[in-house]
Image: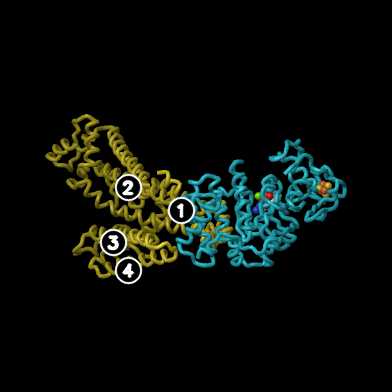
Amino acid sequence: MAQTLEIESRGGKAGTPLLEVQNLVMHYGTKEGDVSAVEDVTFTLNNGEAIGLVGESGCGKTSIALTLLRLLPDNSVVKSGDVRLDGESLIGLDEEQMRRRRWRDISMVFQGAMNSWNPVYRIGDQIREALRLHWPETLTYQEETERIAALFELVGLNPATMERYPHEFSGGMRQRAVIAMALSCNPKVIIADEPTTALDVIVQDQILRELKKIQKELGMSIIYISHDIAVIAEVTERMGVMYAGKLVELGSTIEVFHRPKHPYSYLLLKSTPSITGPRRKLAPLEGEPPNLIEPPSGCRFHPRCPFATQQCIDEDPPLTTVGEGHSVACWHWQEVPEIGGLQK
Amino acid sequence: MVKYIAKRFGQIFILFYVFLALLFLLLDLQPGDISQQFVGNPNIPPEAKVIMVRQLGLDQPKIVQLGHHLWNYSFGMDMGVSWSSYPREVADILFTALPRTVFLFLTATVLSFWLGFYTGKLVAWRRGTVVEKSVMVTSIFFWTVFYPWFAILMLWFFASQLGWFPIGKFITVETWIGSPFSADSVFILMLTSIAAVTLVYGILRLVIDRSTDDPRSRQNLHRIALWSLIAVATVFWAFNSRRTYAMDILWHTVVPVLTLTLVNFAGTTLLTRSSMLETLREDYILTARAKGVPESTIRDRHAARNAMLPVTTSLVLQLAVVIAGGVITEQIFSWPGLGRALLGAITAEDIPVAMGALALIGVLSLLAHLVADITYAFLDPRIRVQG
Ligand SMILES: Nc1ncnc2c1ncn2[C@@H]1O[C@H](COP(=O)(O)OP(=O)(O)O)[C@@H](O)[C@H]1O
Ligand code: SF4
Ligand SMILES: [Mg+2]
């Protein structure tokens, strides 16, 4: 029995494709018009890999996460594209089939996970609920308790605290417990949407470090989502940069961090105070993110881009390969300068 | 939890005495002297007047009078004698009326809460449908209707037009002629059997919950326990010679209970709906969906369970309204309960009975508050733990 209770990832062989997002287009219908929240997004998460999505608030990161789990609100429409898990299309599943896959195959650590707990039930019982829904065999109460205790220990919580109610936990403890719950059914993929945004910097750092350790130890596949490029840099191997619903740059984290090729990534990095390196002069990222009901023509970044030309206004740049596993959607990527004084 | 209940109990105790003292002072502030009123009352024989002057202790200072008053009410178990039905004891009059009132309100409150909560929950879940809209319109009608008019309408329809139910009152006098049982003894037995079923069920639930952890078998055992208890009670009454009389009383309770239930039910429905809609926007509902919790479980276990909290709170706040409505209800349905005793006493200027009735109504509302508070504490762990 101990064998089946082991905490592990149920993904396949490390490095093989696990979750494939292909040309995903998702809009929200509103009275003012269609919100183009996800526009032609393609990326792959491999087994055992941690990847990141970064971009300003409102650029469609959460929308992608919710599309993967099919938890979108009623006014949303998946216009085209596909999401494949182990080769099977999730978009084509009926609601009941999808429900069985949630948390079992893809679990999630939500943005603002502080409020992810139902205030009237004990933390342990809320994890127990996930186990009862998805664990392939029927576990005894004792076995469930043992598993929850093991999960608590893994995320650095005292197992005795599983008897407590959410309001008796600190923010950091609640977030650790959310991670324990996300791991509870041995998922294939975990999506962590702004997993530490609401926490203070010290706790944030501790939790990120532990998440990274757990991810490595279990060979877990994780998609991190954050507006904070420093968070993404700390925990991922590959990352995508999003702007106004589109994926504008995709590459290894080290590569994007050191040699960004998209003007938006470049400005984003320049305007982020470096944690590790020497102080940099902050370059301004001027203007506001665009309205997604009537997004700018051509390249959506052109109103804010210092490199913009007439071509950028007229034509939408395709995602082109610029190096080993590194692609960028920009007409003038070659003009983007080297980032100065940044070390990882 | 024990600390919390003890604290609440202490508060209620103090409040009760403050209430009694206020009642006393309010009456004392009335223009004229109470003694004037009863001295001039020709219904009371002169020798009784002498006794009553002494009993009332009107020659003593006010503070001593107040002390006596409080002492008699709490430890002396003595609320004096009625003036209009002299020499009947006030306590006797009121404690006969008390169970009738408690029954009427408890039944209507429990029924309307349960039905209203259930309807509100479903309506919020089916937001935007025709069902929702029609339930809303109906509820708003019941909620805003002028209550006395509605009560009379109900009587007219069910009793006068359809003739299904009696026009008010507690019993049909003809049925009871030659009955070996008093109406009150039968009624008390009815109440006792309801209380017994509830109590035994509560105990059985506790026992069941301790014996098994599996939610499915728990639920099944709960059901079996409830239905077997109901079966036992039914068999008990079916073979009881008081059966016909009990049925007569039951028959008289239908329209008043229905009227009160309908009006309270509407309020609970509206409140549950809005509370539910708010709860459904919470983050933990999205978490539950992401966890793959089935929709009906999200509705019942996650959303409705939390939506219940504000509904319970408002139930406490509405209590005053319910009590005020109670006096009207009893009057219209000629239901011989506390409210009617109070109204009758006021009309007959029977001050001891009026005082006693007010005090009892005060005790009832304080107790209801206490029960609601304790229920709330059980429902919300954030209060439970603080103590
Ligand atoms: N239910 C909705 N209806 C209409 N627009 C929405 C809805 N949810 C999100 N949006 C819009 O979609 C865009 C992307 O939102 P979101 O995915 O939450 O971004 P992020 O997570 O990157 O902050 C935003 O412009 C937001 O205003
Ligand atoms: S395509 Fe043009 S506007 Fe868009 S990022 Fe590149 S240079 Fe800037
Ligand atoms: Mg977001």
Q: Chain B appears what colour?
A: yellow
> Alpha carbon of mark 3 to alpha carbon of mark 4: how far?
12 Å
Q: Which residue is mark 2?
A: B364
Inter-mark Cα distance, 3 to 1: 28 Å
Q: Earlier in the sequence, mark 2 or mark 1?
A: 1
Mark 2 or mark 3, which is nearer to you?
3
Quadrant assignment, res A87: bottom right
Q: Earlier in the sequence, mark 3 or mark 1?
A: 3
Mark 1, residue position: B268
Q: Residue at x 61, y 46 (%)?
A: A196
Q: Is mark 3 within 8 Å of ligand 1?
A: no
Chain letter behind tag 3: B
Q: Check if mark 3's residue and mark 1's residue have beta carbons within 8 Å.
A: no
The cyan-coloured chain is labelled A
In the image, taking residue A53 as reference, residue B65 lies left or right, namely: left
Spatial distance from mark 4 to mark 1, Cα to Cα?
A: 30 Å
The amino acid on which the numbered mark 1 sits, given as a three-letter code, is Thr
The earlier-in-sequence mark between 3 and 4 is 3
Say which mark, if any, is on residue A139.
none
Q: Residue at the left extreme?
A: B47
Residue beneath the point at 12% across and 39% down: B47
Residue depth check, mark 2 versus mark 4: number of the one nearer the observer: 4
The residue singled out by tag 4 in the image is B231
Q: Is residue B208 visible?
A: yes
Q: Amino acid at mark 3?
A: Ser
Q: Are marks 2 and 3 on the same chain?
A: yes
Element marked by disc 4: helix
> Residue B266: x and y, percent?
46, 55
Query: What secondary structure is found at the residue carrying circle 1?
Result: helix
Q: Which residue is mark 3?
A: B193
CA neighbours of label 3 inside 10 A, class few (<14), some (14 to 19), many (20+): some
Tags 4 and 1 on a common chain:
yes
